Structures are given as C-alpha cells and as structure tokens.
Amino acid sequence: MKAAEMTLMPAGASVPHRADVLGQAIPFDRARWLPLLPSLAWWPAELDDCPTVAGRRRVDRSTVFGISRRSDTVEGRRHLLTAALVWGAGTKAQSVARRARIFTRSSAGEIDARLEAGLGALREAGAVQAYYAFNNAHRIKFLGPAFFTKVLYFAGHEQCVGALRPLILDRLVARSLRAADNDGKWRGAGWTTRSYGRYLSLAHDHAQQAGVLPDQVEAALFARGKQLLRPT
C-alpha cells in the first residue's frame, strides 16, 4: 500500500489542538532520576520549575522544547536527552531504571559524541538521515527508536531542516499505523529507516490536508494506539 493510499485514522477522527499537544504533561520523580545520572550537571534546571500537580512535578512538551533550544552545546544536548527521557518515562521505578541504563552502559564521552553526531545529521541532512544515524553508526546503547525519536522530535520539529519534521515513533504510534495498513507492513518494533521515512511522509500529508502541524497528527496516532489497547 502506497503512502498516498493509506488512511492514517478512522473517518471522523480529529487531531488535538496544538496547545493541547504542547501542554501534554507527564509526572516525574526528581529523586528517582538524580542518582542514576552521570552527574547533577545532566539535570536541566527547567525541570525544577515545573508545576506540581497531586504531589508530583509535571513536565510538558513545551518545556522540553525550551530546553532543546540549547542543543548546540554539549551541556544543552545532555539536558535535552535527560528531559526527553524524563518526559517519556513517567514515574514508575522500573521505567526510570530502564531508561537510565543508557548512562551505565556508555561513558559520558561516548554519549556526548553520539548525540553530537546524530543531532548534527538532523541539522545537516534532516529527520530521516538522523534516524539512520541514531539507529546505526551513532547508536547509543539502550536508547532505542521510541526514545531517540523523542530527542529528534524536540530538537527538530520546531527548527526543521528539509521537508519532513521529525516525529516520535513508539509502540502506540506503531500500533495505529499497523491498524491503518491493510498490507501489514508495519511491525511492532525494530522499525527501519525506510519505515520511519514512510511514517513521516504519511503524517505530513495528513497534516497538510487537515491544516495542522505534523506533531498534532502524531499525538492523534498515539491516542488512537491507546484506544486500540483497550479490550473491546
């Protein structure tokens, strides 16, 4: 099935307002993260200014975008990585510990070098080449597509190079893509660079037709993926 022939969402499905996308806030536990980071210098100060709801600080997409604007420096890239992990992991101890394996299996210097190379590919060649970089030569151990696409998204969606803005691709988005694709070409994990490029093309086409930004389509796919998990 060609990208142009594939309908991403059911008829009548809507996409969220951009303000709602930017306001998507995830609770986090600072005390759980700090002992797992290479040093306190990896923790962005903006996270300590996030609002507290029901006893937990909550970080939204808008805050992580603000942090990402410093990603042209070593410290800024470290802060972007941490913020993207915190936003994506939530508060569960197991989820935080799994994400933090990044810091125990690679040295700070290795992570710095691979972040610089992958985000350099994003700036110079665009989202698809950056995906290839992070998934191959510049792969960071335990930083899989579901999370390195978060890094790419925050680094490049609002500062786009090329025609395609980077978007998050995780298991819920992939579930939506599989549900929309009668040819069954979408896999649950292990997504290739070609698959990522196809996803971006589909999302951008849908966004253009709907008069919205691509990350609004990604957010709608994520929500649809959640719905598909529920028992019928």
Image (cartoon, helix red, strand yellow):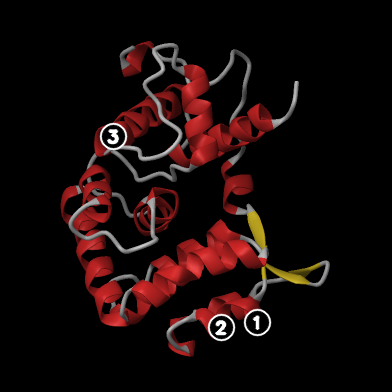
Position of 52 with respect to 2 (left or right) is right
Q: Which mark is residue 197?
A: 3
Q: Are marks 1 and 2 in contact (CB under 8 Å)?
A: yes
Specify the amino acid type for callout 1. Ala
Q: Give coordinates of residue 64: x percent, y percent.
A: 50, 64
Circle 2 packing at 10 Å, graded few (<14), some (14-19), many (20+), is: some
Residue hosting label 1: 31
Q: Nearer the viewer, mark 3 or mark 2?
A: 2
Q: How many marks?
A: 3
Position above or below: 110 against 183:
below
Task: Kindly identify which numbered label has been placed on residue 34.
Answer: 2
Numbered disc 2: secondary structure: helix
Of callouts 3 and 2, the N-terminal one:
2
Residue at image point 29% right, 77% down: 73
- Amino acid type at mark 2: Leu
Circles 1 and 3, Cβ within 8 Å, touching? The answer is: no
Cα separation, mark 1 vs mark 2, equals 6 Å
The secondary element bearing badge 3 is classed as helix
